[in-house]
Image (tube, grey):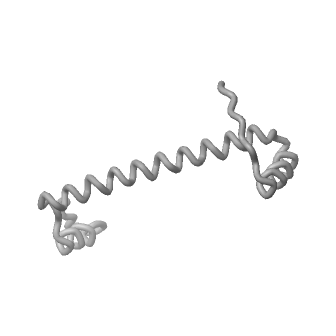
Amino acid sequence: MSITSIRLNKDVDRPLEILAEKLDRSKNYLINQAIKEFLAKQSLEDSRWEDTLKALDSIKSGKSIDEEDVNAWLNSWGTGDRKDAPNP
């Protein structure tokens, strides 16, 4: 475990102290939890961005499916005549 020193603004420090007391946790614990959540959110955003770039490359290369074909496939769900998924 490493030690990192940070300076908290007063508008962050006081509410953090109050929350730590309320939850019976240390400020250190709450700060670590907040950083973990932030890192997870950033990782998810990075993953979604990569998926977006792949999708754009797919479109640029002509790999797309007509909206009517997708709608026909989706509308067949729950019917006795379910269609196969359309392919690009």
Q: Is residue 74 left or right of residue 31?
A: left
Residue 59 in sight here: yes
Point out residue 68 in the picture as x, y percentages from the top left corner: 18, 75
Point out residue 19 in the picture as x, y percentages from the top left corner: 82, 51
In this view, 48 is above or below 81: above
The quarter in which the C terminus is drawn is bottom left
Name the residue at 86% across, 52% down. 18
Which residue in the rendered view is the most extreme toward the bottom? 68
In this view, 50 is above or below 80: above
Point out residue 9 in the picture as x, y percentages from the top left corner: 77, 53
Name the residue at 68% across, 33% down. 4
Q: Is residue 53 left or right of residue 63?
A: right
Q: Is residue 24 left or right of residue 28?
A: right
Point out residue 37 in the picture as x, y percentages from the top left corner: 60, 46
Name the residue at 37% across, 54% down. 49
The quarter in which the N terminus is drawn is top right
Q: Quadrant of residue 35?
A: top right
Residue 88 in sight here: no
Name the residue at 65% across, 26% down. 2
- Decide which of 59, 14 is in the foreground and name it: 14
